[in-house]
Image (cartoon, helix red, strand yellow):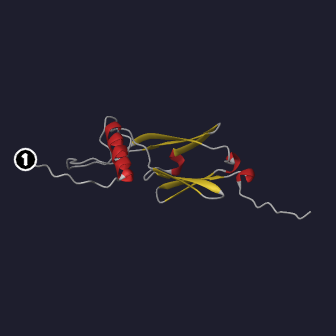
Amino acid sequence: MSVRWAARPAQPVNSWREINRVIDETFGLGNGADGWFDRAWAPAVDVTEDQKAYVIALEVPGVKPEEVKIHLDGNRLIVSGEKKQEVEERTDRLHRFERRFGSFSRTFTLPDTVNTEAIEARTQHGVLTLTLPKSEKAQPRTIPVNAS
């Protein structure tokens, strides 16, 4: 019997995605995961940065702005709230239930470059956007060269 061997190109990015997916599914860390903690719900988050600010965008569809709490504790930013289940009188049986409800909390450790006095929060179309401006000393600046 002969065994045919073919070299596979290394795909480190896809490999890490697969490892993350397995961990998320196992421990219920991802949205929609059916892991051990499948009752847990945490909004998906994107964190971006430009020269002037960090931006944190959280998906919170169905959560009213007044049901979201944002706390700053030292260098930790804590976003918490609750997505309440809509209770409707149903005459039919429920066959599939995938939407998640309940309390959530996300904590972000902020770098020293954030101007905590100027943090802004807004919500639009189910996305909570936090803008964390960088302090003046963190802004890039040009230093002129003087001739002597």
Compare residues 49 and 35 and report the one nearer the observer: 49
Q: Is residue 31 left or right of residue 91?
A: right
**Residue, x 49% and y 42% (percent of image)?**
81
In the image, farthest residue toward the right: 148
Image quadrant where one finds the C terminus = bottom right
Q: Which residue is mark 1?
A: 1
In the image, farthest residue toward the front: 2
Quarter location, residue 49: bottom right
Q: Residues within 10 Å of mark 1 (few under 14, many from 20)?
A: few
* Residue 90 in picture, x, y percent from top left: 25, 49
* Residue 18 in picture, x, y percent from top left: 33, 47
Which amino acid does the dot numbered 1 rest on? Met
Quarter location, residue 26: top left
Compare residues 104 and 34 and report the one nearer the observer: 34
Q: Is residue 33 left or right of residue 110?
A: left
Q: Please state the total of marks drawn on the protein image.
A: 1
Q: Is residue 27 above or below residue 119?
A: above
In the image, farthest residue toward the bottom: 147
* Residue 121 in picture, x, y percent from top left: 59, 52
Q: Is residue 42 left or right of residue 71?
A: left
**Residue, x 20% and y 50% (percent of image)?**
92
In the image, farthest residue toward the top: 36
Q: Secondary structure at mark 1?
A: loop
* Residue 64 in picture, x, y percent from top left: 49, 50
